[in-house]
Amino acid sequence: MSDPVRWTHVYVDRPARSFARACDFWTAVTRTSLSEPRGEGGEFVTLLPKDADACAKVQAVGDGDGGAHLDLAVRDVPGFVAAALELGAETAAAHDGWAVLRSPAGHLFCAVPWHGESVRPPVVAGSRLDQLCMDLPPSAYETEIAFWNGLLPDWSARPGSRPEFYVVEPPPGLPVRILLQRLDTEGAARAHLDLACGPDIDAVRARHEELGAVLVARHPHWTVMRDPTGGLYCLTGRDAETGGLPRAGARTTRVTTGR
């Protein structure tokens, strides 16, 4: 069994040419401040919440259009990496004290040291950045479910309320959960970020549009957006406080998706 995950971070990966614009947008959306840049080229920054521990970061990437990835913070990084490799992951890059791994479907994620983080950022402006959605081709879907179930045995894993969704939810207190989504067609695996907005999707959407985001598509229970750098993300009808679906009898009971 792998070392339990003690904290989670999501990375907003955006092209280097639009890194500054991405930082401006995501700090505004999450009402955070920006850390000093890190890395050889200043390619990493952390979104710093007030009176809480950070769980979101931005990375400038040199190739492609970017996306999103997950950092899993543990006490025993080598042990966690070994467990991931045994379950079918591959090492994408090894660093001093941390590693970049690739899941069986091809999703990049990092195993990093835990630095004592424990205080989850609050809901801000009616929403919370709390989910990484891994978009999977049909041929990789079941294998990826088995991988994350094996790597995170203390997380709550279950089918979503739609057949194309599978939820991997962390123990209480951890800030980011995983949603696996089976796509309709084959292709490369990719990932995007989701915000929980409860019944206030339209209000959150309007605020994001004021900050430069663009509406891409409306669905009954979630809205697809494009941030000012071109990156896709979703606003979902999940409860912003709990991350779960609305309770039966609430005024948002028509929200029934696993998003």
Image (cartoon, rainbow, N blue to C red):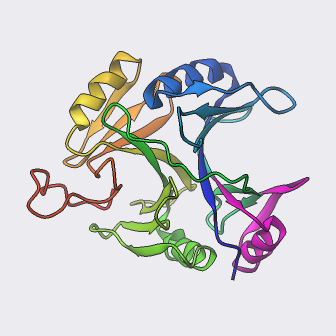
**Along the line of sight, the residue nearer the viewer: 26 or 74:** 74
Please give the name of the residue rendered at 76% of the width and 65% of the height, measured from the top-left corner.
75
Pick the quarter of the image with the C terminus. bottom left
Residue 46 screen position, x and y as percent? 65, 34
**Along the line of sight, the residue nearer the viewer: 47 or 84:** 47
Please state if 227 lies on the left or on the right of 103 as rendered: left
Please state if 38 lies on the left or on the right of 245 as rendered: right
The quarter holding residue 91 reads bottom right
Residue 62 screen position, x and y as percent? 74, 32
Q: Residue furthest right?
A: 96
Please give the name of the residue rendered at 82% of the width and 55% of the height, measured from the top-left corner.
98
Residue 67 screen position, x and y as percent? 57, 41
**Along the line of sight, the residue nearer the viewer: 47 or 65:** 47
Is-magenta flag for residue 89? yes
Q: Which residues are magenta?
A: 71-99
Please state if 147 lies on the left or on the right of 214 as rendered: right
The quarter holding residue 224 reads top left
Q: How many marks?
A: 0
Pick the quarter of the image with the N terminus. bottom right
Is-magenta flag for residue 43? no
Image height of 28 relative to 180, above or below: above
Please give the name of the residue rendered at 52% of the width and 28% of the height, measured from the top-left corner.
32
Residue 199 screen position, x and y as percent? 19, 43
Please give the name of the residue rendered at 41% of the width and 18% of the height, measured from the top-left corner.
212
Q: Residue furthest front?
A: 51
Q: Residue furthest bottom?
A: 1
